[in-house]
Amino acid sequence: MVRLDDEYYALAGGSVREVARWRPPTPVPGAPSLLPGIINQRGVVLPVVDLRQILGVAIAPPDRTTRLVIIHHQAVRAALMVDAALDLLTIQPAELSPPPVGLSPQRVRMLQSLTQYQSYPLQVLNLEILITMLQEGG
């Protein structure tokens, strides 16, 4: 589970390889702003993806809690920039419900489902759609 501003998101645990401390990426000329650059993580060059921009969350500068969630989903590897990496959760299928009506179409497309974490809504990201959007240029 990760946090962006005051929103909570879940990522498929099987796709998460590690969580790393924030470090500024090396900018890539011509890359869109949602890809602020690349990092070298254990000898592998990874694009850094700013989840705030993709999900329409207000932009904020990185701070001491900012983390990079290293994912490997299908053949794609990337570092997702999040405000904080919080916890590992087991979510049962019966706990999931479809995204609510009224969200922006882009956000609905990115969400696989919704559940609760304590008293907060927990949005389950669809990594396949996220990667497809990145490959299509956002």
Image: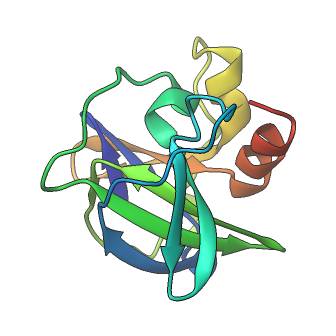
The residue sitting at 45% across, 66% down in the picture is 69
**In the figure, 60 relative to 118: above or below?**
above
Closer to the camera in the image, 104 or 44: 44
**For residue 134, side relative to residue 29 (left or right):** right
**In the figure, 96 relative to 114: above or below?**
below
Q: Position of residue 39 (x, y in %)?
A: 50, 65
Q: Is residue 10 visible?
A: no
Q: Position of residue 98 (x, y in %)?
A: 65, 38
List the single residue furthest toward the bottom: 42
Question: Can you say which quadrant of the picture contains the N terminus?
Answer: bottom left
Q: Position of residue 130 (x, y in %)?
A: 71, 46
Q: Quadrant of residue 87?
A: bottom left
Q: Is residue 19 visible?
A: yes
Q: Quadrant of residue 18?
A: bottom left
**For residue 106, side relative to residue 116 (left or right):** right
**For residue 74, side relative to residue 124 (left or right):** right
Numbered disc total: 0
The residue sitting at 50% across, 56% down in the picture is 80
Closer to the camera in the image, 37 or 66: 37
Closer to the camera in the image, 109 or 131: 131
List the single residue furthest toward the left: 64
Question: Can you say which quadrant of the picture contains the C terminus?
Answer: top right
List the single residue furthest toward the front: 29
Q: Quadrant of residue 110?
A: top right
Q: Position of residue 136 (x, y in %)?
A: 87, 36
The residue sitting at 22% across, 53% down in the picture is 118
Q: How is the image coloured?
A: rainbow
Closer to the camera in the image, 1 or 44: 44
